[in-house]
Amino acid sequence: MAVGDTRSSNFFDFIVDRDTERCIECLVCIQQCPYDANIHRTVEPKGVVSDFAKCTGCHRCEAICPTGCITIRRNPSQFREHDIWTDWHIKNLYKQTATGGVLLTGSGNDYEYPIYWDHILLDACQVTNPSIDPLREPMELRTYLGSKPDKLEFEEKEGKIELKTELAPQLVLEVPVLFSAMSYGAINLNLCEALARTAEAMGTLYNTGEGGLHKRLYRYGKNTIVQVASGRFGVDIDYLSVAAAAEIKIGQGAKPGIGGHLPGEKVGEDVSKTRMIPIGTDALSPAPQHDIYSIEDLKQLIFAIKEATNYEKPVSVKIAAVHNSAAIASGIVRAGADIVAIDGFRGGTGAAPTMIRNNVGIPIELALASVDQRLRDEGIRSHASIIAAGGFRNSADVVKAIALGADAVYIATPALIAVGCTMCQKCYTGKCPWGITTNDPYLAKRLNPDIATEQLINLLRAWSREIKEFMGAMGINAIESLRGNRERLRGVNLTERELGILGIKHAGESW
């Protein structure tokens, strides 16, 4: 700590340790911190000091400091131990008594609920069913998203066999990973462009979220899923026509049952044009879609979008993972959706009420398994693809999700971390020090779209290679053969009830 360090509140979370022997007072830490946590004092004691209460733990100043003199660490000071009244609960009450406001946060649910991916193990071939070397043998990750017919009919024409069945429009993915909905406004245009360029380079798709589609990104339309949410921001015929697919957003995993709010400070000229709202006005997304109060209403919107796009594009419906997801998904499929996207409670967000984020919804693992099983039991599983979202951390999670029944997965937080996010969870302030969740022109320049594209491509390329390694170990050479193949999964440290919902056997049980 430097002499003269301050604290505008006594109960702060982080300490900025500054080695004054190594500090050259270049003031870079002051320039880099959008929260004004670092200060240059011109009166005694002079020098660079910090206001600990303003530090968010983003580590930007630590990463940029040219002499490495800064270390950000947790404040070791704690209240007296109490099993119920932890530091977190006490500090939250202090914040609310000071402001009278709702507690806000970013990212996904970080409560210590079970992470079922960590209790599921994958199978591997031994002796009788040999594994496959992905470095020597072809491995197929191509995935088709959309409604499939129950059966195919063929006919012979002029001595040739031709397909008679008319197929529904399909999305083709070269890797079963898509970038989840992140709205322009919540993130800046540099990141939107990097996501679009990566999707094009890797043969996958990114989702615009509810913030509309900037005209500069129309060229990436064939790799774009446009979202139609309750605010209808940016939705017109050009928006629907340019994309590869449209997604109706009913719910979001991080905040099921509530709408969204983009503060007016983040609605500049470009965001205003793209969302089709006045500059500086708050962009409020209602909690429900005001024209959808039944499956029949949903069906009308699905077919309105299909009609508007000449039945050439798949329509997806996204819901949050909640207690009755399986029945809801069944209704969505019967309403004509080509894709059902399910977002678990660990799904990220730019801004959500902390209590909602941490206490509403269910894990994606349980929701995915129950939805897949319900659609199979009703004989309509092939009528729609399933995209799972919410809390995917690595390629192993992706492989397990596909074996549980997903056709593909959405990722968002891994993409943000790939371009520099350190999970300080202050996205809602609009002051992201890494230039990711901000539209401040000065801060947004910190995210170079060329570098971000390279980082995102590397992420998907690495995961693709690892997915192929998993498949090879299981003796599978096409991702299609893994989908819903729960016999290749086993559970550990799970109850009979949990195993039953997941539809998998306990480790040690054979075929």
Image (tube, grey):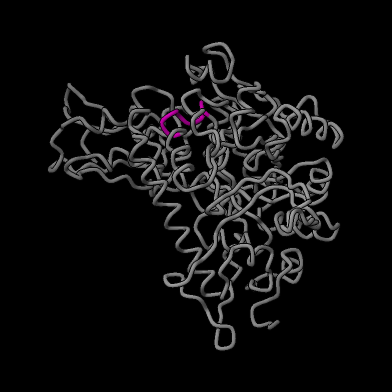
How far from the left and from the top, in percent, is residue 509?
Answer: 69, 82
Q: Quadrant of the N terminus?
A: top left
Q: Quadrant of residue 54?
A: top left
Q: State yes or no: residue 396 in magenta.
A: no
Dominant SS in magenta: loop
Q: Relative to the observer, which residue lies in front, 382 or 298?
A: 382
Q: Relative to the observer, which residue lies in front, 373 or 43?
A: 373
Eyeballing the image, is 13 above or below 402?
Answer: above
User: Outermost residue toward the bottom?
Assistant: 127
Q: Quadrant of residue 407?
A: bottom right
Task: Write the start and end of the magenta stretch as one range.
Answer: 184-191
User: Outermost residue toward the top?
Assistant: 278
Q: Quadrant of residue 59?
A: top left
Which residue is at a point 59% across and 51% down the rendered structure image? 409
Eyeballing the image, is 374 above or below 422?
Answer: below
Residue 81 appears left or right of 497: left
Q: Quadrant of the C terminus?
A: bottom right
Eyeballing the image, is 380 above or below 437?
Answer: below
Residue 45 appears left or right of 8: left
Residue 91 appears left or right of 492: left
Which residue is at a point 21% across and 31% down the rendered structure image? 48
The answer to whether residue 166 is visible is yes
Count of marks overlaid on the render: 0
Q: Relative to the observer, which residue lies in front, 393 or 215?
A: 215
Q: State yes or no: residue 189 in magenta.
A: yes
